[in-house]
Structures are given as C-alpha cells and as structure tokens.
C-alpha cells in the first residue's frame, strides 16, 4: 500500500508515520489504530487499500500459507514505449512494491478449509492484466483443479495492460476458460471484489465465479465513470458501479466489511468444499411424526384462507428454523435482484444444501417489499442460477413454495416471464442432485411449479396447490367471483386431495392451530420430513435421481394413471 493510495500522512521528525487523513471523510486517524482496523476508517468505514501480502495474511489461517512458486516470465511482446520503456516500468513497480507482478498466488486454509488464492495488487501497474498476470491466475486455478480445492480470486485492477496489446486481451479468454474447467470439476469458485475492479478483469474471471463478494464501496464495471461521462455524456448516479449499486441490481451476491470476510468465506467453504465420501444426515431418524391436527374433511375454501394466513412462517422464517450456517446469495447476474425469491447455501443436519423459496411477509410493508411473493423473471433466473450451482457442487436442492402466482405485470412480460418459468421447469427436471419441493402455503399455478419439480413433493397440511386461484377459476368458468368457495371445492386443491391424485408424496403435519400458531413446532415437523427425504434420496446416483424425477412427472395424465 502506498501513502497516495489511501490518505495524506503526517510524520515525526524521525520519519515515522503517526497520523493519516482518511481519503473519504478526511478525518485524522492514528496510523497504528488504522492498521489494527485493517485499514478501515473508524469514523466513516472507508475501506483503504491493502497490498496482496497483507490480504493473504488477513484471510488465511496462520501457519498454513504457502506462496506458490509458479513458472511465469514477464515479457515485452510489443517492445512498447510511452514516456519510458515498458521493461523500465516493470522494474520500477518491482522496486516500489517488492512484488514480481500484479498478482500473488498462495495456498492455505480458512478456518481449516483448504483452498488456493490469487490476490491482485493495484499498486503494481494498477493491477493491470498482462500476460504474466493471466498466466499466474490460470496456473492458480489449475493448481486448485489438481488439488481438488476451491479457488478464491481477490480482484483489484484498472483493466487489461495496454503495454501488451492483444496479448493482454487474450488473457480474458484464457482465465475464463480456466474457470470453465473448475466448473466441470465441480469446484467452488469465489471472487472478492476490492476497489477498483474494471475493464478486462471485470469482463472475465472477476464475474464468472460462483459467488461474488464485494467490500463496501468497492467499484466494479467494464467502463469507468470518467470514460462513460466523457464519451457519451451520460449523467450517472453518485453510487454508480459501487458494491451497493451492484447488489441492488443483482450483479453480486454479498457485501461484507473487511472484518467479516474470513467468517463469511469460512461458511461458504464449509458448505461448498468437495467432500471425501458420501454425504449422510448427521441425526438419527426419529419415530414417524403424527399430525397434531389432522387435515380431516375441512371445507376447501377455509383451507385456502388458512394457507393465506399472514402469520404462517415465510421462507425466511423456515431458513432460520431449519438451517445452520446459511448464507443468502442474491441477484440473477443479469441486472436485477428480485426479493420475491430468496435462497442460498446452508447446512441441514450436517448436509450442505441449496435452499430457495418464495418470500411473502407478515406485514403490509413486508408484503410490498417482497411483491407479495410474486416473482418476476429475475426471481426465477436467480433461482435457476442457484440450482445450477447446486448441480455443479453436488448439493441437494430444497425449494419452499408459497406464492399466489408469478407476477403478471407489463415489465414481467417484457422480460420473458413465461420463458423464465419454462426454463426453470426444464432445469429442475434434469438436475442430477436430490430435489425436495414443499408447498408451505399457496401453490399458485406455473409460478409455483417453477420451483416444484422435485423427486419428492411435500405439502403442509393446511397448504393448497392449484392450476389457478379459486377466485380466478370462478371468474372464468362461473363468470362470478363470488363462486370462489365452489371453485375451491371443484379444484381439489387441499393436501389430502392432492395426495390422492399423486400430485404430492407426503403431507407435512401442522401443529394445533396451523403453522401460524407455532413456528417452532412447524419448523420441527418440516425438518423431520425433509430429513426423511434426504435419507431416501442421498444414496441414489445422479442417473437414478434424474430418471426418477422425470418418471414421476411423466406419469401425470398418462393412461391408467389414477393417483395414489
């Protein structure tokens, strides 16, 4: 780290730095205090720049770090000279930073989880991506592939190195292809975006990993603010390209302060690292649960009202009741973050899983914030991204369904609502991992089925699942919305009726008064049923899981199919 990179400094007569001025808020901070806070300003939270070796020391477990001695040689393919020859610029950067190049690669562990890291250093020629940098990052990925461990890339770059011309440009393709190999091998990849990350780095390996984390305020983009403003004269918002802007637009998964990075990375590695043997449920199987409140022969319209009760547990509630070490992942990586679907990585009784589901809310404000649990295409594309990640890492998928249906607005249609739903259905049918879908409240039409193509499909005792809402059916077929109770009965949408039709496999018991009366008991019942499904599905091969799921849905409407 250089003084100019972070702050103005004051020194003693002996030349020792004592006080620094924060680059953002300009407050004076005692330098030793700033060092203890990992170069994060205690007044405004500005994350100052740290060099590659400091970053490695901060992130990796003490005593586990090995700097990788990878073969690479800096070249001058263009014999480039601007105000000075390129080789002289390289020599100056080496002398000033003590580094050989703009990236340092190492192996080690984070809270005991082994990995390979490639850490870029902006102080070496702006962290620019040249032939040697691309080669070192590629070799780091190949080392991760050889050792069968995850890869973490810490980015800080102004873009591709101009002094190497098209050779630098080709590094974007080389590093991207390397990440494709890690995808094929089922290895977790993570990017930590630090400020700034631009150009060819942003348009290649930085944004191709499974999980993208950013430090607060870190900027990431293809073209920088100054380039955009000067070339096309466009007015940009103040937070343009910052981590906060990127998160709101669905382009990154997480923002984490520097002090929380190790813990966050450890959780992700614990869930996403390769296992050495078959995955099993940690807990012994309990005796079969008996319903505290039988579903009985309640009036279907009453069941519909119970399924819509705003006090029933939401997906967010169940995540807290069911999982350990949950880490929410956000965004569709295409420009949108839909809060009507939430999901991420967690552990259920020791089993790493991907969990996703519709999110409503308990209050008017929460319902509005989550669009009443009605996803847009971005929500379904986010869920597809998470399911592809589950398939890559070999993790079971648990989907929780509670939606009146997909959002029917103009923007949803413009962005391909029907296509997004169809893609999800096809994707789920072909996942090579266990898939367990649970209708926890409303299961409304294709918006529900887009998360419902499971090996096992469960339903809570007072939930409903139907091709259309009773009100919609009444309006279309009876031309009378008041006929909704009659339509609810005709649609056979209650849990016992759906079980008889074979639409669902099992009914999850609910506590007296329904799940809305006792969230903890509701979570216990759902956890018991999910673990029963995992015990049945985890021993199956990829081919068996796919074949079983396709056969399950192939049967509906076939000759002689009468349900269960």
Image (cartoon, rainbow, N blue to C red):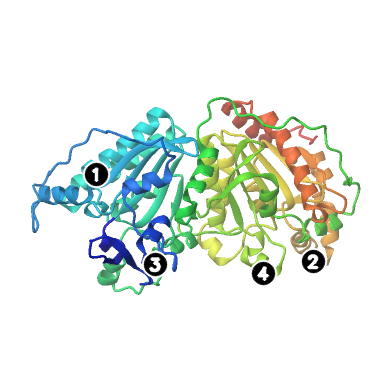
Can you see residue 500?
yes
Crowd rating for badge 3 (residues with CA inside 10 Å; few <14, some 14–19, many 20+): some
Nearer-the-camera pick, 242 or 476? 242
The residue where tag 2 is placed is 481
Q: Is residue 89 left or right of residue 123?
A: left
- Where is 165 relative to 530, above or below? below
Task: Work out how far the residue at label 4 is from the one at label 3, CA to CA, in angstroms.
Answer: 27 Å
Q: Which residue is mark 1?
A: 170
Q: State the residue in front, 83 or 537.
A: 83
N-terminal of the pair, mark 2 or mark 4, is 4
Between the residue at mark 3 and the residue at mark 1, the CA separation in whole angstroms equals 28 Å
Circle 2 SS class: helix
Q: Pointers 3 and 1 in contact (CB under 8 A)?
A: no
Rendered-image quadrant of the C terminus = top right
- Label 4 sits on residue: 365
Q: Secondary structure at mark 4?
A: helix
Q: Which residue in the protein does label 3 denote?
A: 240
Please indicate, yes or no, whether residue 558 appears anywhere in the rendered image.
no
Q: Residue furthest right?
A: 297
Taking the spot 55% from the left edge, 41% from the top edge, the residue there is 427
**Relative to 141, is 359 on the left or the right?**
right
Q: What's the distance in space between the residues labelled 2 and 4, CA to CA?
A: 27 Å
Q: Quadrant of residue 230?
A: bottom left
Q: Mark 2 or mark 4: which is in front? A: 4
The N terminus, quarter of image: bottom left
Report x, y in % for residue 105. Answer: 32, 39
Q: Are marks 2 and 1 in contact (CB under 8 Å)?
A: no
The reply to whether the C-beta atoms of the residues labelled 4 and 1 are less than 8 Å apart is no
Residue at the image position 85 percent from the left and 60 percent from the top: 485
Please tell me whether mark 3 sits on a helix, a strand or a loop: loop
Decide which of tag 4 and tag 3 comes sooner along the chain.
Answer: 3
């Amino acid at each position: 780290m250089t003084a100019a990179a972070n702050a103005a400094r004051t020194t003693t007569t002996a030349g020792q730095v004592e006080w620094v001025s924060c680059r953002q808020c300009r407050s004076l901070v005692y330098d030793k205090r700033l060092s203890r806070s990992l170069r994060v300003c205690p007044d405004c939270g500005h994350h100052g720049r740290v060099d590659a070796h400091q970053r490695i020391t901060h992130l990796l477990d003490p005593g586990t770090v090995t700097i990788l001695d990878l073969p690479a040689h800096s070249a001058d393919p263009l014999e480039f000279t601007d105000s000075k020859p390129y080789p002289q610029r390289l020599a100056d950067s080496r002398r000033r930073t003590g580094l050989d190049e703009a990236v340092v690669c190492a192996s080690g562990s984070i809270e005991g989880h082994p990995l390979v890291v490639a850490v870029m250093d902006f102080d070496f020629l702006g962290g620019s991506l040249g032939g040697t940098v691309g080669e070192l990052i590629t070799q780091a990925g190949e080392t991760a592939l050889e050792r069968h461990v995850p890869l973490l890339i810490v980015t800080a770059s102004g873009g591709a190195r101009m002094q190497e011309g098209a050779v630098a440009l080709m590094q974007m393709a080389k590093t991207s292809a390397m990440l494709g190999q890690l995808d094929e091998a089922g290895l977790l990849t993570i990017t930590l975006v630090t400020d700034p990350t631009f150009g060819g780095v942003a348009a290649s390996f930085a944004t191709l990993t499974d999980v993208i984390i950013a430090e607060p305020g870190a900027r990431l983009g293809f073209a920088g603010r100054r380039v955009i403003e000067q070339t096309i004269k466009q007015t940009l918002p103040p937070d343009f390209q910052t981590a906060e802007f990127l998160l709101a637009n669905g382009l990154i998964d997480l923002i984490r302060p520097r002090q929380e990075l190790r813990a966050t990375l450890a959780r992700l590695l614990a869930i996403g690292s390769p296992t050495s043997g078959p995955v099993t449920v940690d807990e012994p199987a309990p005796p079969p649960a008996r319903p505290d409140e039988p579903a009985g022969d309640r009036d279907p319209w009453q069941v519909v009202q119970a399924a819509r009760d705003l006090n029933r547990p939401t997906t967010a509630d169940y995540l807290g009741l069911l999982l350990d070490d949950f880490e929410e992942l956000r965004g569709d990586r295409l420009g949108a973050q839909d809060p009507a679907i939430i999901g991420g990585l967690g552990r259920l009784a020791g089993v790493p899983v991907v969990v996703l589901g519709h999110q409503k809310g308990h209050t008017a404000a929460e319902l509005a914030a989550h669009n009443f649990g009605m996803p847009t295409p971005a929500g379904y594309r986010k869920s597809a991204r998470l399911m592809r990640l589950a398939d890559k890492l070999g993790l079971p998928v648990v989907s929780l369904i509670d939606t009146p249906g997909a959002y029917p607005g103009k923007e949803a249609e413009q962005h391909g609502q029907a296509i997004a739903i169809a893609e999800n259905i096809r994707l789920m049918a072909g996942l090579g991992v266990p898939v367990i879908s649970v209708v926890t409240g409303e299961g409304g039409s294709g918006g529900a089925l887009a998360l419902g193509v499971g090996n096992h499909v469960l339903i809570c005792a007072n939930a409903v699942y139907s091709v259309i809402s009773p009100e919609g059916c009444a309006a279309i077929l009876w031309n009378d919305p008041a006929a909704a109770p009659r339509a609810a009965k005709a649609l056979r949408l209650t849990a016992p009726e759906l079980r008889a039709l074979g639409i669902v496999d099992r009914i999850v018991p609910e506590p007296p008064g329904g799940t809305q009366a006792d969230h903890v008991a509701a979570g216990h019942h759902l956890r018991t049923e999910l673990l029963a499904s995992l015990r049945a599905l985890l021993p199956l091969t990829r081919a068996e899981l796919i074949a079983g799921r396709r056969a399950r849905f192939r049967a509906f409407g076939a000759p002689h199919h009468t349900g269960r």
